Amino acid sequence: MNGRMVITIDGPAGAGKSSVARGLAQRLGFEFLDTGAMYRCVALAGKRAGVDWSDPRQLERVARAIRLDCRGDVILLDGEDVSREIRSPEVTSLVVHAAGNREIREILVAMQRRLAGGRDMVSEGRDQGTIVFPEARCKIFLTASPIERARRRWREVSARGETTTLEEVLEQQNLRDAQDADRALAPLRPAADAVEVCSDGLTADEVLRTIETIVSDRRHGQ
Ligand code: DC
């Protein structure tokens, strides 16, 4: 067995996965992979190419043609840094076309496995522990109550200067939760061997420390 270790962090939007995954990677000296950003890039590329969203083949062609470079927090689409643009409300609403497409999922899953090859990595998404890295030694399923998640996202979005209400954020989130959980492909669910952590009432640092303890136990074979 080689020494590489993949840690998967899955869970719904707004549970705090990204900051935990990033923090954990930093502390352990691992790489960090934000797989949601990859689905967002495909949606952005589709928007730029002016695809007809009612014809999935068009977005599939775009997904096959683009080049993605994932470097921690920075994601390059055909060489251009789109890390900010992929977070726009428009891309967020279009991403379902990428995430719900079988062929696009196959392309991105293969890319994720390739990126992890031979590396120590913290990989964050919805299906990392169930589908992409079923053999991962340490799997975390991070949750939080819908209202707590909406509050966090609302604060984040407001800090970026977007004007929206907590109710709107919650409504959007409920829609996305339903899409993620109900879709036929890679629905959001914890892997059988995942450890579930609920971040309600915990600070980001407390969540990180909780997860670090779990990881350390798993690394040492407990
Ligand atoms: O985590 P996020 O909000 O950036 O994810 C964007 C979308 O991509 C979200 O609708 C869920 C989907 N996604 C997915 O289907 N599989 C993943 N591994 C990561 C994200």
Image (cartoon, grey):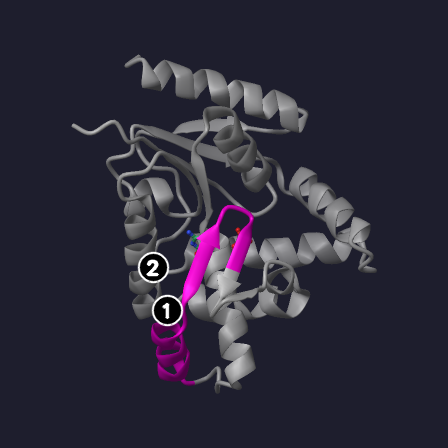
> Which numbered dot is residue 185?
2
Q: Secondary structure at mark 2?
A: loop
Discs 1, 2 touching: Cβ within 8 Å: yes
Residue located at (50% from left, 70% from top): 43
Q: Residue 120 at x, y = what percent?
A: 35, 34
Mark earlier in primary sequence (1, 2): 1
- 185 or 128, which lies in front? 128
Q: Is residue 148 magenta?
A: no
Q: Is residue 139 left or right of residue 157?
A: left
Q: CA distance from mark 1 to mark 2?
A: 8 Å
Image mark for residue 208: none
The quarter holding residue 203 reads top right
**1 or 2: mark nearer the eye:** 1
Give the labeled residue for mark 1: 101
> 158 or 79, which is in the foreground?
79
**Observer-nearest of 145 and 135:** 135
**Horizontal and vertical percent position of residue 24:** 51, 29
Q: Quadrant of the C terminus?
A: top left
How crowded is the residue under tag 2: few (<14 C-alpha within 10 Å), some, or many (20+)?
A: some
Image x and y of residue 162, in percent: 80, 59
For the record, the magenta segment spans 55-75
For label 1, the SS is loop
Q: Residue furthest toward the left?
A: 1
Type of the residue with mark 1: Asn
* Residue pictured at 55% horizontal, 53% vertical: 74
Q: Residue furthest front?
A: 79
Relative placement, left or right, of 157 versus 141 is right
**Residue placed at 52% from the left, 30% from the top?**
26
Q: Quadrant of residue 192?
A: top left
Quadrant where the N terminus sits is top left
The three-letter code of the residue at mark 2 reads Leu
Residue 114 in the figure: left or right of residue 149 = left
